[in-house]
Image (cartoon, rainbow, N blue to C red):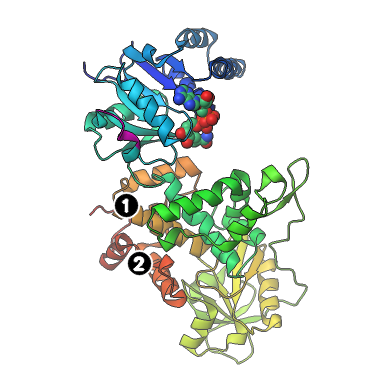
Amino acid sequence: MKFDANADDFTIGVIGAGAMGQGIVQVSLQGGMQVLLFDANKEGASAGRDLIFQRLDRSVDKGRLELDAVSQMKNNLILVDSIAAFKSCNVVVEAVFEDLKIKHAVYEELEQHVSSECIIASNTSSLPISSLGRSCERQERFAGLHFFNPVPLMRLVEVIRGPSTDDWVIDGLVKLGERMGRTPVVVRDAPGFLVNTGGRAFTTEALHILHEGVAIQSQVDAVMRDCAHFRMGPFELMDLTGVDVNYPASLIMHEQNSYDPRIRTVPFHKSLYDAGRFGRKTGHGNYKYDAKGNMIDVESPDYQTSSQKATKVIIGEDAEIFSDILAGSGMAVTDDGESPIVAALFGEDCSSFAHRTGLDYRRIVAIDTTGDLSKRVTLMTAPGAAKSVIDSVVALINENGRAVTVIKDSPGFISQRIRAMIGNLGCEMAQIELATPDDIDLAMRLGLNYPMGPLEIIDDFGTDLAHRIMSIMQEITGDDRYRPSPWLRRRALLGLGAHVLS
Ligand SMILES: NC(=O)c1ccc[n+]([C@@H]2O[C@H](COP(=O)([O-])OP(=O)(O)OC[C@H]3O[C@@H](n4cnc5c(N)ncnc54)[C@H](O)[C@@H]3O)[C@@H](O)[C@H]2O)c1
């Protein structure tokens, strides 16, 4: 029997009627499949079915599904009271508790009943497919099928190839995902798979910025929303997913990736966890929330000044970029010894720039020009900078209709640094062939709602500039967290785009 996910009589078995199992059943029904559902807890299974039916009914009310179609879907779902009932299944997706022993016992029992052509897939979010598949007699028909919560709303599904998985199994699961209305991305078995690994840079780099005293949470979040177009800043996101979830996940991912400093978190993350400041669910995390869930007492990310605007600025470097945001001031390249010196820096901090150029560090105002500057501009000054200088530049930029966030001296500002880290980690994922460059971008856009995929971010900088930012950050900090991926380095050296395959 050839596996055909598009067959009319295609039957899927789902084990586990919890949050994920329900979602998988729903998209399978919407894909016109026969569905058998088993849960060790009988009441849990019928409660799960009731919730699925309620959601389908709501879709009818909203005009998204036809009443007749939903009646047919309901007829296509059968609750079964043992795994033995899965005999006729073409595929079985397991979504039971995240426990290796429980999952192993499920596969051992399952293999006694299903045919040898039946694919067995796990929806695990963190257990390696290699260790899950070990208990299967036929490991070649075992793979991961990683959905995201809530399944009906999240289009992405990661199809995870274990070390023994056959090609027909991967092809079959890709077609199955498509029939469920999802967008499948094939990923190699690795800790955290694709999205959970790729997502580490966004939050951990924000935490490093906080840890180093460069900026506070509201500044980082505002910059990432306004200048980098993320729907939510990294600290808001941490509070939403819960520090009780993302702190342990960070530790596990760091350990399982051989303690790669690229995904290392900071002690403040542990402090939040230890203090029970989990975020929205406890009313306090990075931010405080009132009973209705509104953020309260948030410090403004905007620098306030009532000073006079600068009438003249000295262009320290990369002059042409400033004509729009600094319009209204005279611009000169020769230092008059008193005006603010503005410079666009890339990976470099103000102190290094002053040292390199010999310019007066007290008057240097560095600008991050790598993001969208239409709403907000990020400025940075060296230790010992004159307040009157920064005030006069902020007043000038405010007059041109932009908010200004002023941070402490740091290589890479906020947006430049976090985006370069996301991109570099994406390059590393391409280097180790976790997935194709296009699939890495697609998965990160769909799975995490990123405005661009990581390799698209690198192309947005240009590989040469992205490589320069990472190399300088590594040099200044002495931290291998910032080491450029060989994937990025090679493409930068050759003048190639980030998507060019090896
Ligand atoms: N919740 C998420 O956001 C999410 C996202 C992606 C993947 N996952 C993974 O999906 C799986 C399920 O997660 P969930 O959030 O739906 O869990 P859940 O706790 O909501 O549901 C698990 C269900 O499995 C049932 N069950 C437990 N042992 C069983 C067994 N031996 N046989 C049959 N049924 C059994 C339980 O009764 C329960 O109804 C886990 O592996 C989890 O890591 C979860």
Q: CA distance from mark 2 to mark 1?
A: 17 Å
Badge 2 local density, few (<14 within 10 Å), some, or many (20+)? many
Q: Nearer the viewer's eye, disc 2 or disc 1?
A: 1
User: Can you give x and y, in whole percent of width and height, for residue 315 in the image?
Assistant: 54, 81
368 vs 314: above or below: above
According to the picture, the residue beneath numbered tag 1 turns out to be: 430
Name which residue type carries label 1. Ala
Q: Which residue of the protein is positioned furthest toward the bottom in this rendering?
A: 337
Instruction: Give the left or right position of residue 240, taking residue 456 as reference.
Output: right
Instruction: Give the left or right position of residue 292, taking residue 136 as reference.
Output: right
User: Can you give x and y, in whole percent of width and height, for residue 171 in the image?
Assistant: 27, 30
Specify the segment rendered in magenta. 132-137
User: Can you give x and y, in whole percent of width and height, for residue 85 in the image?
Assistant: 38, 11
* Rendered residue at 54%/64% (across/down): 208
Along the line of sight, which residue is nearer the eye, 460 or 190? Answer: 190
Along the line of sight, which residue is nearer the eye, 95 or 483? Answer: 95
Is residue 23 visible to the viewer in this orientation of the structure?
Answer: no
Q: Would you say the residues marked 2 and 1 are in contact, meaning their CB atoms lie under 8 Å apart?
A: no
Is residue 159 visible to the viewer in this orientation of the structure?
Answer: yes
Where's the N terminus, which quadrant? top left
Name which residue type carries label 2. Asp
Does the magenta portion include 136? Answer: yes
Looking at the rendered structure, the secondary structure element under dot 1 is helix
According to the picture, the residue beneath numbered tag 2 turns out to be: 464
